[in-house]
Amino acid sequence: MTTDFRSAAKADAFTLRRRPPSEKMVDLGFRQLSLALASVVAIVLLGIFLVVFQGSQEAIREFGLKFLTTSAWDPVNNEYGAFTAIYGTLVTALLSLLFAIPLGLGTAILITEDMLPRGLRDAIGLMVELLAAIPSVVLGLWAIFVMEPALRPVLQFLHQILGWSPLFNTIPQGPGMAPAILILVVMVLPIITAISRDALNQVPIELRQGAYGVGTTRWGAISSVIVPAAISAITGGVMLALGRAMGETMAVTMIIGNAMNFSTSLLAPGNTIASMLANQFGEADGIQVSALMYAALILMILTFAVNILAQWVVRRLSLRY
């Protein structure tokens, strides 16, 4: 009798596990649709890369790797080098992160760790989200008419006391690298803050309670337990912000000065690859088009390198913490 009961139970379980063919077809269709959509994304990305690579062939044959190390940009004599734009892209992006990371992470901690009244925390979170929704051209106009005039006395003071340094050896007279760095801080700050806030909110409550249970202070729990537990997601957000900073076009174009003369000074006008493309592509002709395509190819490679680095860093941090 016991054997019959077990057989009946197994039969009932088998019956419950059986699924009608229609459900299997839905699952198969969903799987195939997801694969097709993912393939479309990969095909579009590959197509963009191939178009840019094909368009840059003439410049690659003409200038080779010298294009990366020279800063001459003379359409009249067909002499082109992208070192100034590459330098501007990397310096503005990295220095903007240097300011944005502590601001964004600090804001996220302030919002998530109950250091302020709930209404104020919600207001700060809403303002951060609204900051991300402002169009870049509006931020560029704000930088031209408000930020740069207000910032100029500070930059002049830096030039007076640090003028011996190659980073501050030019007189600030308007648009330049420093205002472009600060406008990028404004643009990437919402990304870092939002992702850091979500990452900190996902830290298990048991870790927080355990930290307080062993007698640590609030700042000890934050620095030793909570932030390390969320560090992989925070790092992913930082890398995403770095990619955004490297590819930002309109706001940077409006405030950086768009000068192709190389200067290490942050107070002098400069250029980035994205702003150079936006300024010159509409009027380019002949080999200049290929040179701009070559610069776009370099920007794509830099962006891919940032994404690969982000994946590696996030994976290592995930295993460590």
Image (cartoon, rainbow, N blue to C red):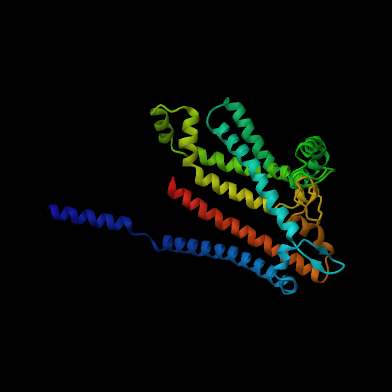
Q: Quadrant of residue 112?
A: top right
Q: Residue at x 86, y 69 (%)?
A: 77
Q: Residue at x 83, y 37 (%)?
A: 149
Front residue (pair 13, 47): 47
Report x, y in % for residue 181. 72, 45
Q: Quadrant of residue 174?
A: top right
Q: Residue at x 84, y 66 (%)?
A: 75
Report x, y in % for residue 97. 64, 45
Task: From the viewer's perspective, tell me whether residue 230 is left or right of residue 255.
Answer: left
Query: Which corner quadrant holds the C terminus?
Result: top left
Judged from this view, the residue extending furthest toward the left is 1
Report x, y in % for residue 89. 70, 54
Q: Residue at x 38, y 61 (%)?
A: 20
Task: From the viewer's perspective, tell me whether residue 82 is left or right of residue 120.
Answer: right
Above or below, comparing residue 311 to residue 78 in the picture: above
Judged from this view, the residue extending furthest toward the top is 117
Above or below, comparing residue 74 to residue 211 in the picture: below
Report x, y in % for residue 203. 46, 39
Front residue (pair 311, 28): 311
Front residue (pair 139, 173): 173
Task: From the viewer's perspective, tell me whether residue 265 is left or right of residue 90.
Answer: right
Judged from this view, the residue extending furthest toward the front is 164
Q: Quadrant of residue 145?
A: top right
Above or below, comparing residue 225 to residue 285 in the picture: above
What count of labels does the image hold? 0
Above or below, comparing residue 296 to residue 204 in the picture: below
